[in-house]
Amino acid sequence: MTGIASSFGSIAVLLSLTSLGVAVMAASGGQGPGKPGLFEGKWRKVSVSECGKLYPDEIEFFGVRYLGRKGGSGQTYIVWDAGTYAADGPGRVKITTSTDEQVVYRYTLEGDSLTFTDPHGCELRYSRSQ
């Protein structure tokens, strides 16, 4: 009986964790950790600013990962090189930077226009480039 009781206990814990995951997704508006497809596709930066030079000229989002690319603007270092991203509440996304720090950015997504605002107020506008 001990083996059966242990199995039932394990199932109960698994069901509780699954319920918790569903509750977390519901609380975040359906945008659970790393919601795949949030910004799916290729994007090209259309804004030009001094602070924006640290961010990639081109970026591709796929699943819960992204890949930043230097473009023709002569960039030498980019903050978003490759990593992960995840929804962090309405209009907020957590992006892993080149130093592996997870930074929260505000964003707006309207059709083929995606705008990020970094913690210092730097605004980055991207346009879908597929």
Image: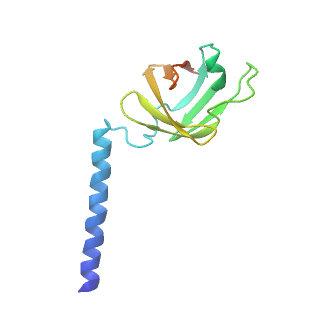
- Where is residue 30 drawn, in percent x and y? 33, 38
Tell how many labels. 0
| Residue at x 26%, y 81% (from the top left corner) | 4
Q: Quadrant of residue 93?
A: top left
Eyeballing the image, is 107 above or below 80? above
Q: Where is the C terminus found, in terms of image quarters?
A: top right
- Residue reaching furthest to the front: 120
Eyeballing the image, is 60 above or below 1? above
Does the image show residue 20? yes
- Where is residue 21 drawn, in percent x and y? 32, 50
Q: In the image shown, does 94 or 61 lie closer to the viewer?
A: 94
Q: Where is the N terminus found, in terms of image quarters?
A: bottom left
- Where is residue 67 drawn, in percent x and y? 62, 36
- Residue reaching furthest to the top: 48
Q: In the image shown, does 61 or 82 lie closer to the viewer?
A: 82
- Where is residue 96 drawn, in percent x and y? 55, 39
Q: Quadrant of residue 6?
A: bottom left
Eyeballing the image, is 7 above or below 118? below
Does the image show residue 130? no
| Residue at x 60%, y 15% (from the top left corner) | 46
| Residue at x 62%, y 19% (from the top left corner) | 51
Residue 29 horizontal side relative to residue 50, left or right: left
